[in-house]
Amino acid sequence: NKLTTLDEHIKKSLQGKRISYITVHNDLQHFNLRYQLTQLASIQTNEHQTPSVKHILKLKNLLKGSPNSCILSSSQVPSKWVKILKKGNNNLTVTIDTIGLSLNDGKQLYFDLMQNLTAQVRRCHIDSKS
């Protein structure tokens, strides 16, 4: 079964990796649960509401206390929030594509999306350790 093979590939790719991150919003919750990843927080808790200064400061402090964590960004979110979070922190930023904007339509789309997402999330672990 192609889905089972994909799931096993993702598990193997992420197995033993301690990956934690802050993301733009909570769109990876099922991916996190399935593959035992740690989402520390979200920049936007409500997509229709701008994050408060208090929330951004909380996230900055969270990143300072988690130097091996990274920020997962996406092209759909204003980069100003990521820039603010990165200022004064050395955390890696990885751009992810959770909806497959860069992929071709077709039967393979879901599988390509999941493989790309896995590779992008995995960069948090690889790059944050170097």
Image (cartoon, rainbow, N blue to C red):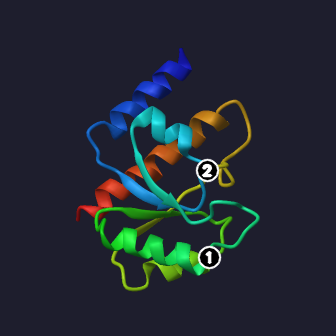
Of 45 and 83, the residue lying toward us: 45
Furthest-right residue in view?
48
Mark nearer the viewer, 1 or 2:
1
Of 7 and 41, the residue lying toward us: 41
Q: Residues within 10 Å of mark 2 (few under 14, many from 20)?
A: some
Furthest-top residue in view?
1
Pinpoint residue 13: horizontal percent, then vertical percent: 35, 38
Report whether 47 appears left or right of 7.
Answer: right
Pinpoint residue 55: horizontal percent, then vertical percent: 54, 72
Question: At label 1, which amino acid type do we have?
Answer: Ser
Pinpoint residue 110: horizontal percent, then vertical percent: 63, 35
Task: Name the residue rendered at 70%, 30% in the picture.
Answer: 107
Task: Name the residue rendered at 73%, 35% in the picture.
Answer: 106
Q: How many marks?
A: 2
* Mark 2 secondary-structure assignment: loop
Task: Name the residue rendered at 31%, 65% in the picture.
Answer: 66
Residue 93 vs 9, above or below: the answer is: below
Q: Which mark is residue 98?
A: 2
Report whether 11 appears left or right of 45.
Answer: left
Task: Name the residue rendered at 54%, 77% in the picture.
Answer: 54
* Mark 1 secondary-structure assignment: loop
Report whether 36 appears left or right of 99.
Answer: left
Residue 70 vs 119, above or below: the answer is: below
For label 1, the residue is 52
User: Split into 4 quadrants, where in the image is the C terminus?
Assistant: bottom left
Question: At label 2, which amino acid type do we have?
Answer: Thr
